[in-house]
Image (cartoon, rainbow, N blue to C red):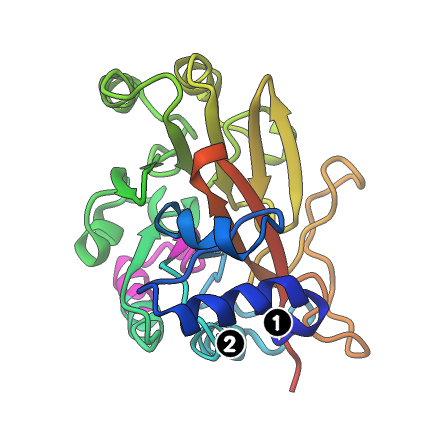
């Protein structure tokens, strides 16, 4: 985590905010000067995205440290000099199992480990490994609704469920819910959509798509400041659909190959000379007036 020396302008602004006693931490995507930063501090913030922890996975050839990766990530977030405004896990908290009792045991274990985060403002989302075999029943017992909204410092967040339907659909009922929610928003409102699967057809042959995702994008398209953060594909990836930016997060269990780069979607094998290569999480810095986001990808440290 400790890469702040590579980003001295961020460190300077963090120090300035602490010294100024502004009651919160705010970041922007460009160096604008301390005076303007202080003036806009109430509409800038950052959060941490973690994804695809797959608690319960067992595959030594792919990750012999599977039991340690999630606790390492929790420890790294706890060690941040400035805590994020909130933390979000974008799905596949646990690895799939056909046994309902084992599914609940893994969800309970994940929740206990994530409970070690000292920042208690944490949002959870399901992945298909958590929810597709029982349509989110067990997941909801531990974490509540599979889709929801919340607002933070002028940004409207929408958490969509494109996983609890085993056919990889959002579904008509949830799309109607999304349409009704968006109808209450101004066309210039900053909106962040959180999903597990990509909403666009990245590589449907590998289940890297949402079957009715185009309908969600169509509903979002009239809104001029929309950004989507998702997981599922276990790698950093960036895509535009019109003016809507989509950003995939790395996994915390094993990386996957680039879409269509090999015949099968097999995990990239563990390299003992480069442990934790390809794994990580990210900080997302939001500047609300311009609805811009700066992503900082962070590795899981070995040792």
The structure residue drawn at horizontal position 74% and vertical position 64%, both measured from the top left corner, is 269
In-front residue for pair 300/131 = 300
Q: Are marks 1 and 2 in contact (CB under 8 Å)?
A: yes
What residue is shown with label 1?
300
Observer-nearest of 65 and 132: 65
* Closer to us: 66 or 202: 202
Question: What residue range appears in magenta?
Answer: 87-107
When asked about the image quadrant of residue 85, the answer is: bottom left
Q: Which residue is mark 2?
A: 76
Question: How many badges with numbers are in the image?
Answer: 2
Judging from the image, what secondary structure is the residue with disc 1 in?
loop
Could you tell whether 223 is left or right of 7 in the image? left
Examine the structure image and report whether residue 121 is included in the region drawn in magenta: no
One can see residue 90 in this view? no
> Looking at the image, is 55 positioned above or below residue 249?
below
Mark 1 / mark 2, whichever is N-terminal: 2
Indicate the position of residue 241 as horizontal and vertical percent values: 59, 21
């Amino acid at each position: 985590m400790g890469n702040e020396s590579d980003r001295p302008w961020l460190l300077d602004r963090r120090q300035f905010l602490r010294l100024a006693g502004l009651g919160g931490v705010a970041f922007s995507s460009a160096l604008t000067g301390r005076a303007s930063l202080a003036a806009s501090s109430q509409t800038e913030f950052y959060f941490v995205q973690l994804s695809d922890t797959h608690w319960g996975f067992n595959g030594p050839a792919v990750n012999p440290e599977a039991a340690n990766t999630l606790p390492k990530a929790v420890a790294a977030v706890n060690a941040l000099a400035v805590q994020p405004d909130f933390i979000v896990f974008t799905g596949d908290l646990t690895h799939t199992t056909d046994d309902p009792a084992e599914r609940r045991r893994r969800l309970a274990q994940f929740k206990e480990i994530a409970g070690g985060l000292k920042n208690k403002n944490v949002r959870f989302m399901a992945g298909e490994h958590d929810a597709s075999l029982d349509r989110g029943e067990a997941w909801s017992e531990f974490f509540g609704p599979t889709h929801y909204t919340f607002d933070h410092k002028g940004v409207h967040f929408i958490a969509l469920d494109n996983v609890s339907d085993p056919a990889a659909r959002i579904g008509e009922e949830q799309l109607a819910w999304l349409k009704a929610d968006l109808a209450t928003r101004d066309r210039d409102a900053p909106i962040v959509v959180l999903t597990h699967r990509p909403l666009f057809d990245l590589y449907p042959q590998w289940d890297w798509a949402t079957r009715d995702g185009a309908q969600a994008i169509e509903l979002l398209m009239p809104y001029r400041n929309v950004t989507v953060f998702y997981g599922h594909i276990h790698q950093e990836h960036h895509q535009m659909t019109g003016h809507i930016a989509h950003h995939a997060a790395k996994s915390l269990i094993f990386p996957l190959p680039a879409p269509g780069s090999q015949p099968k979607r097999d995990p990239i094998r563990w390299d003992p000379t480069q442990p934790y290569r390809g794994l990580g999480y990210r900080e997302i810095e939001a500047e609300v007036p311009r609805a811009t986001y700066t992503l900082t990808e962070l590795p899981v440290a070995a040792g």
